[in-house]
Amino acid sequence: MAELLTLQEIDRFANRYPEWKLIPGKWMVKKYKFDNYLDGIEFVSEVGQLAESFQHHPHITINYKLVTLKLSTWNVNGLTQADLKMAVLFDEAFSKL
């Protein structure tokens, strides 16, 4: 079973990736802005493929040219290394568009 992150691990991540907003105790959230709607849809498709390959799925909200991803690990009710890994992978996918 996955283990919850320590406060130090969360702080370290937050310092390296300040665009990811931490909601104390459970969630991390990031908003990605796109020049057009279809770029956002393409990104969501890539996020879906990554999430499925790692069996760790974010909440995804699409608001026209804004995509919001929200991560947490359900079975431990908080943040784990899997969330951090997925956040980095999602950022990498975004940078390739």
Image (cartoon, grey):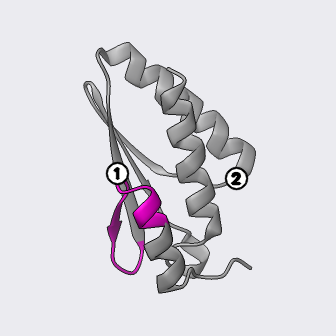
**Circles 2 and 1 in contact, beta carbons < 8 Å:** no
Relative to the observer, which residue lies in front, 66 or 22? 22
Is residue 88 rendered to the left or right of residue 23?
right
Check residue 40 for magenta coloring.
no
Instruction: From this view, report whether residue 81 is shown above or below residue 29.
Output: below
Instruction: From this view, report whether residue 57 is shown above or below residue 72.
Output: above
Relative to the observer, which residue lies in front, 6 or 55? 6
Is residue 72 rendered to the left or right of residue 89?
left
Which residue is identified by label 2? 55
Residue 14: quadrant of the picture: bottom left
Residue at image x 47%, y 84%?
7
Residue at image x 36%, y 49%?
30
**Magenta extent:** 13-26
Instruction: From this view, report whether residue 62 is shown above or below residue 14.
Output: above
Quarter of the image with the N terminus in it: bottom right
Q: Position of residue 51 (x, y in %)?
A: 63, 45
Q: Distance between the residues labelled 2 and 1?
A: 24 Å
Residue 92: quadrant of the picture: top right
Which residue is identified by label 1? 19
Residue at image x 65%, y 39%?
50
Q: How crowded is mark 2: few (under 14 residues within 10 Å), some or many (20 or more)?
A: few
Q: What residue type is labelled 1?
A: Glu
Relative to the observer, which residue lies in front, 60 or 92? 92
Q: What residue type is labelled 2?
A: Gln
Instruction: From this view, report whether residue 3 is shown above or below residue 72.
Output: below
